[in-house]
Image (cartoon, rainbow, N blue to C red):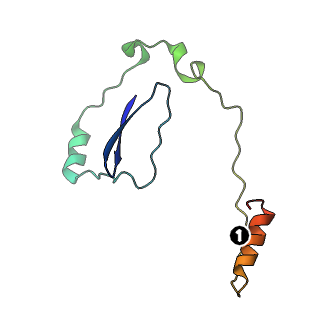
Amino acid sequence: VKIQRQTEAGYDIVEASLPAVASVTAGVVEPRYPSFKGILAAKKKPVETYGLADLGVDAGQVGSAGAWSKVESFEAAPPRQAGTVVTDDGEGADKLLEFLTSKKFV
């Protein structure tokens, strides 16, 4: 796969062999909203549907039968706990350092 990445200086070209994972950070791409005329034109266009046989793909290569990984289980994330509010009464830095030390960040 070859990707053009836009930077402040221009474009970088990034290449990787497949399979690969690519991500986009929020705010990178401005959404393009269709015009009313474009929406109406899209409604009139036919939608073509292809089956596996049309594409020459064996059914054993796709779906859960052809997957490289399998989801064994999943569960909902635990609800977030309330945070700690530190009021700076002149000792805010000390309280913050104490909190970070208790969490072993420092």
Q: Residue, x 71% and y 69% (percent of image)?
A: 83
Can residue 28 be spotted in the picture? yes
Callout 1: SS: loop
The image shows residue 71, relative to residue 10, as above or below, that is above
Q: Where in the figure is residue 8, as x and y percent of width and height? A: 33, 52
Q: Where in the figure is residue 3, as x and y percent of width and height? A: 37, 35
Look at mark 1 in the image and give the residue it sits on: 83
Q: Residue, x 80% and y 65% (percent of image)?
A: 102
Q: Quadrant of the C terminus?
A: bottom right
As drawn, the residue found furthest toward the bottom would be 89
Location of residue 41 by image quarter: top left
As drawn, the residue found furthest toward the right would be 102
Q: Where in the figure is residue 86, as x and y percent of width and height? A: 71, 78
Q: Residue, x 38% and y 15% (percent of image)?
A: 55
The image shows residue 68, relative to residue 30, as above or below, that is above
Q: Is residue 38 left or right of residue 105?
A: left
Q: Hey, what amino acid is under mark 1?
A: Gly
Name the one closer to the observer, 40 or 18.
18
Name the one closer to the observer, 93 or 103.
93
